[in-house]
Image (cartoon, grey):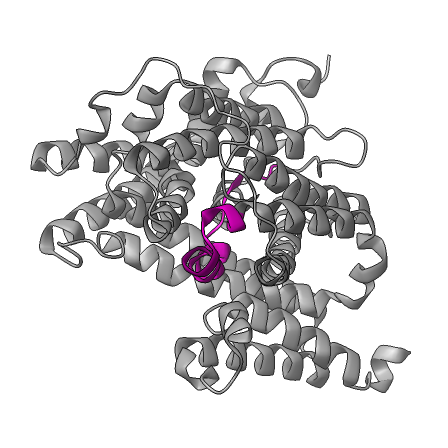
Amino acid sequence: MSTKSKADVKNIYNLDGRVPVAKAVPFGLQHILAMFVANITPIIIVTGMCGLSASETATLIQTAMIIAGIGSLIQLFPFWKFGSGLPIIMGVSFTFVSVFAYVGTNYGYEAIIGAVIVGGIVEGLLGFFAKYWRKIISPIVAASVVTAIGFSLLTVGANSFAGGNGAADFGSAQNWLLGCVTLVCCIGFNILAKGHYKQLSVLFGLVVGYILALCLGVVDFSALEGIGIVSLPKIMPYTPVFNIDAIIAVALIFLVSATETIGDTTALAATALGREPTDKEISGSLAVDGFVSSLSACFGCMPVTSFSQNVGLVAMTKVVNRFTIATGACIMIIAGLFPAVGAILATLPEAVLGGCTIMMFGTIVVSGMQMVAKCGFSQRNITILALSLSIGLGFTQVPQIFAGFPQLFQTIFAENCVAVVFVLAIILNLVMPKEKEEQQ
């Protein structure tokens, strides 16, 4: 009997195959802990700007966990044209925060919901035709986008390491201690552990960092007060408003989200499976990205997309087994149905999370570089990569440079380096003549 046909922990490195549940759960939990804070933070930011109450925000957080878990399961185990069949974890994206701030303050939260319903359908339908417009996304374009995703996440990891954006103790010695201890534990465990246990280094670092945070008295348990036993999402808690300006702005950001999903899917296939993603995988991934986001809006929540954090975790650990990662998706759904579970996971301090994510995000940068190396360092490829990254990463570090552009343009591009890199790389790839040796 082959290894894949029987339950064996060695199958964690195989896309398919059974893994004992007790062995699979820690790897799944590791994925959820890596993305949990980033999954709920956009909701907290946007609902705060839109003036929603604390109870409404808590309800939307629970709903987001359920929707993200369902979306992840569809990605892992596709049906018809929905899902990629790759180990992709879904979550609420930061990509939409700036445009939602604009739409929410001008038109209200109900306009956000209406725009997400329409925008999600647009992206989902585009996903069905991915094989046609994917032709303009050459390997060097994909490599540029993956590299940009990695670089864009480095500041996310650094902010978490320091305590999280807006934290009163941002950059304090206490946060440095938590981040450094967590990081050292991750590295030490990876060096000293044997066999498949090495791949639990992130979970080990999170546990040690959390215990240290408990000892220092910095874990906030206030979220556990007054929570119910079971919480079910409500359909259409907000009446959607279909404002044309809001729809156009949000639909454009959905296209940006689609580029990130293509980059994530490409990076995951390249780093974990050693190959390019198929048209079917790209199409299925985008279909879930769009249509599940529309479903999320029907329950009053924000859109979900593939999480680059988890792509980095897969790239670092090489754990690609779908059943194993599906246990993490089930944990998300449980966390949404039972508020206490989600509330406990939410007590994980940002500095502890930052200590783990620093190395994970760096892995995505390296993955992009490896993809560039496979493309070859021809003068044409160097020009496309160098120009798209220098403008995309450089200009978005100084968003005031876009002050003369329309507000909608600023909302989409001013602080979104991935969008700028994607657009520039495609334009350069189309207009730059191919070199003779490449044509041959």
Query: How far across and down, in percent of the image, does residue 185 sit?
Result: 26, 41
Q: Can residue 179 be seen in this view?
A: yes
Query: How far across and down, in percent of the image, does residue 327 sit?
Result: 52, 23
Picture residue at 52% right of the left edge, 50% below the top: 112
Query: How far across and down, in percent of the image, does residue 32 sit?
Result: 43, 33
Residue lying furthest right in this view?
440
Left or right position of 338 against 408: left
Tell me which secondary structure the magenta stretch mostly adopts. Answer: helix
Which image quarter holds the C terminus?
Answer: bottom right
Picture residue at 15% right of the left edge, 37% below the top: 213
Left or right position of 269 against 43: right
Q: In which quarter of the image is residue 389?
A: bottom right
Count of marks, rendered view: 0
In front of the other: 407 or 108? 108
Residue 243 lies, with reference to residue 292, above or below; the image says below
Residue 327 lies, with reference to residue 87, above or below; the image says above
In front of the other: 430 or 147? 430
- Magenta residue span: 87-112
Picture residue at 62% right of the left edge, 52% below the top: 261
Query: How far across and down, in percent of the image, does residue 275 sit?
Result: 72, 50
Which image quarter holds the N terminus?
Answer: top right
Is 346 magenta? The answer is no
Residue 100 lies, with reference to residue 55, above or below; the image says below
Q: Can residue 275 be seen in this view?
A: no
Left or right position of 24 against 131: left
Q: Quadrant of residue 280?
A: top right
Q: Quadrant of residue 136?
A: bottom right
Is 95 magenta? The answer is yes
Residue 213 lies, with reference to residue 421, above or below; the image says above
